């Protein structure tokens, strides 16, 4: 089994939030995987998948792209391993959590750390990333970095549902983590790997939850090499 994942100029720095969702899901399932680093413009290694972006999983000749589709594939292909979702209703709820994480966590973090991600890259990836992301955001990445402190308050406030949940129990999914946790944690692990910006207050219950997520699976995320 191979997982194609995004890397920086330093190939040991892996920072895609979507890849981290898959890495945590694989660890949850207890599945060994060969990790294949690819830079933004290195698409040939996973071309058979038909996807232009990672994560891409290759499992004994089966190619699966997109973090959600990979999670569903792992759940269905390896039903004897610990469940990511806890049944069909749990799968549907995890899909909702994933949508929330995309629109609140990732969308909130990206303008604050995009310039830091750009700094991790080398040409031609750096020019590609800056041009494409500035077009998407409609603003200069480095100008956004200069004003990111102003965004921290609204971002933290938007985490209120997550904060309420992890104030009552150790993980979003209950006493033990599952895919709902991984869907959200991917963004925070991405931020931690690519940027020195601390987006959470030390006394925030979300901070404590993030620390628990970093320690899972023998510190899989905590041990990951950081750019800063």
Image: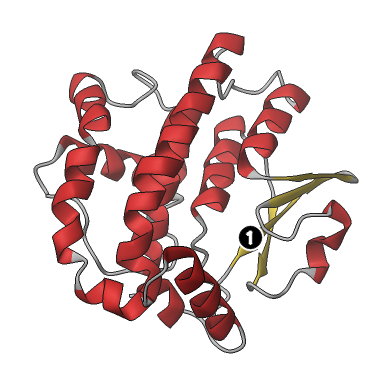
Residue position marked by numbered label 1 in the rendering:
5
Residue 213: give x, y in percent of width and height. 36, 41
Left-right relation of 155 to 201: right
Asked whether residue 218 appears in the rendered view, the answer is yes
Left-right relation of 48 to 216: right
Left-right relation of 228 to 39: left
Q: Work out whether residue 31 or residue 114 is closer to the camera in this orientation and state it.
A: 114
Residue 220: give x, y in percent of width and height. 46, 50
Residue that protrudes farthest toward the left in the picture: 203
Q: Which residue is found at the position 62% from the left and 36% from the top? A: 68
Left-right relation of 163 to 221: left
Mark 1 neighbour class, 10 Å CA radius: few under 14, some 14 to 19, many 20 or more: many
Q: Secondary structure at mark 1?
A: strand
Q: Which residue is found at the position 82% from the left and 70% from the top? A: 44
The image quadrant that residue 97 belongs to is top left
Look at the picture and state if 209 lies above or below 177.
below
Way the structure is coloured = secondary structure
The image quadrant that residue 145 belongs to is bottom left
The quarter of the image holding the C terminus is bottom left
Asked whether residue 178 appears in the rendered view, the answer is no
Look at the picture and state if 118 lies above or below 156.
below
Q: Work out whether residue 134 or residue 31 is closer to the camera in this orientation and state it.
A: 134
Q: Which residue is found at the position 50% from the left and 71% from the top? A: 135
Look at the picture and state if 30 lies above or below 88.
below
Residue that protrudes farthest toward the bottom in the picture: 123
Number of numbered labels in the structure image: 1
Residue 154: give x, y in percent of width and height. 18, 48
């Amino acid at each position: 089994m191979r997982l194609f994942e995004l890397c920086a100029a330093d190939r040991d720095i892996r920072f895609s939030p979507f890849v981290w969702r898959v890495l945590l899901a694989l660890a949850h399932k207890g599945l060994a995987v060969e990790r294949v680093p690819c830079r933004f413009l290195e698409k040939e290694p996973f071309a058979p998948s038909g996807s232009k972006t990672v994560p891409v999983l290759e499992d004994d000749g089966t190619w699966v792209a997109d973090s959600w589709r990979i999670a569903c594939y792992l759940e269905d292909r390896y039903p004897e391993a610990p469940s990511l979702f806890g049944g069909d209703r749990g799968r549907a709820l995890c899909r909702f959590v994933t949508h929330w994480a995309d629109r609140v966590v990732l969308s909130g973090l990206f303008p604050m750390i995009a310039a830091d991600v750009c700094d991790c890259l080398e040409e031609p990836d750096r020019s590609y990333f800056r041009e494409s992301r500035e077009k998407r955001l409609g603003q200069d990445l480095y100008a956004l970095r200069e004003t990111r402190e102003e965004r921290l308050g609204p971002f933290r406030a938007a985490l209120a549902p997550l904060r309420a949940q992890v104030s009552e129990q150790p993980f979003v999914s209950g006493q033990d983590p599952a895919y709902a946790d991984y869907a959200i944690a991917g963004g925070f692990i991405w931020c931690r790997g690519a940027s020195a910006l601390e987006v959470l207050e030390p006394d925030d219950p979300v901070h404590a939850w993030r620390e628990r997520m970093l320690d899972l699976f023998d510190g899989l995320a905590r041990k990951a090499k950081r750019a800063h």
